[in-house]
Image (cartoon, rainbow, N blue to C red):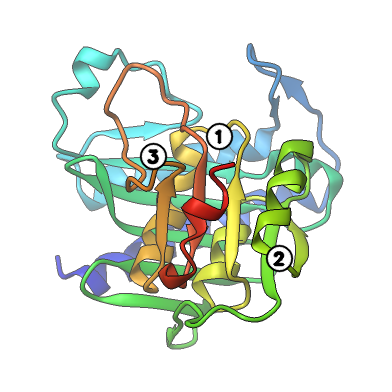
């Protein structure tokens, strides 16, 4: 399957999952706590079931790793050369708070890096889709995908996007190094998408995330011409060890600003 056709097929799956999420979102729902104390709703599970079934139909040979089915031993995962990495509902706290800033994330990982990804926003009906060698696009509903790209050079003052639900005092101190800037708070993978669309310049994440939180959005940013790197400047990689927690990372469009050096203090 060609990359663009694959992206559109994934977008259709994400939209179906998003519709199921909205059915729950527009009514009443209970919130459970998982073992790690993170919240879980029936919207997470409904989205997970749809994505799992549709991906199995689309490409049955590819294994799947989802936030809601992550208990796969590392020796088994380590043998995978390619697999789907899924967050059925990224931003469950935003979902619970009903602010609309939650997404459906589906990525294809090949040789430890995102090859393509879809980030769908159920409330707005917007999807961000991107693949290496194809480019990055924003799609409203069933309309034709519109190309988007990161902003180069970065704005002055730079627009920095940060987590709405995970404030970080250390980050505020480090941001002083980049000089004048405007800070925008946003939930879920939408922070990456603002960078990919050229609406923000920099997203530093100095708090905990898991691999399913970032993979699809990383594919989108990279397809838009941006970078997602660890604090020492290495491209963020996947499925390289038993833990599925990410190191701290930086997302940016204009590499000439040397964001890793600015944040190294």
Q: Quadrant of the C terminus?
A: top right
Q: Earlier in the sequence, mark 3 or mark 1?
A: 3
Q: Residues within 10 Å of mark 1 (few under 14, many from 20)?
A: some
Q: CA distance from mark 3 to mark 2?
A: 45 Å
144 sits left or right of 95 in the view: left
- CB under 8 Å between discs 3 and 2: no
Q: CA distance from mark 1 to mark 2?
A: 26 Å
Q: Nearer the viewer, residue 224 or 42?
A: 224
User: Can the viewer see residue 167 in this picture?
Assistant: yes
Residue tagged by mark 1? 209
- CB under 8 Å between discs 3 and 1: no
Q: Which mark is residue 52?
A: 3
Horizontal and vertical percent position of residue 92:
70, 40
SS for callout 1: loop
Q: Quadrant of the N terminus?
A: bottom left
Task: Give the answer, above or below, for where 227 lies relative to 42.
Answer: below
Task: Give the answer, above or below, for where 51 lies relative to 140.
Answer: above
């Amino acid at each position: 399957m060609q990359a663009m056709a694959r992206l559109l097929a994934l977008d259709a799956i994400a939209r179906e999952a998003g519709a199921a999420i909205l059915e729950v979102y527009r009514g009443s729902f209970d919130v459970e706590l998982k073992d790690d104390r993170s919240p879980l709703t029936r919207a997470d599970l409904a989205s997970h079931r749809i994505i799992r079934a549709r991906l199995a139909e689309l490409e049955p040979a590819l294994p799947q790793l989802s936030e809601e089915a992550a208990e796969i031993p590392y020796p088994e995962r380590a043998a995978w050369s390619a697999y789907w990495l899924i967050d059925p509902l990224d931003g469950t706290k935003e979902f619970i708070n009903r602010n609309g800033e939650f997404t459906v994330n589906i990525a294809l990982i090949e040789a430890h890096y995102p090859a393509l990804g879809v980030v769908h926003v159920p409330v707005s009906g917007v999807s961000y889709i991107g693949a290496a060698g194809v480019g990055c696009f924003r799609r409203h509903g069933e309309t034709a995908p519109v190309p988007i790209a990161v902003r180069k050079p970065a704005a002055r003052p730079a627009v920095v996007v940060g987590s709405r639900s995970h404030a970080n005092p250390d980050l505020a101190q480090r941001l002083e190094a980049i000089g004048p800037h405007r800070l925008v708070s946003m939930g879920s993978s939408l922070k990456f998408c603002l960078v990919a669309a050229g609406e923000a310049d920099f997203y530093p994440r100095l708090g905990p995330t898991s691999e399913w939180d970032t993979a699809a959005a990383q594919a989108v940013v990279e397809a838009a011409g941006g970078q997602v790197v660890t604090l020492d400047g290495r491209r963020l990689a996947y499925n390289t060890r038993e833990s599925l927690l990410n190191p701290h990372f930086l997302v940016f469009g204009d590499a000439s600003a040397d964001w890793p050096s600015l944040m190294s203090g």
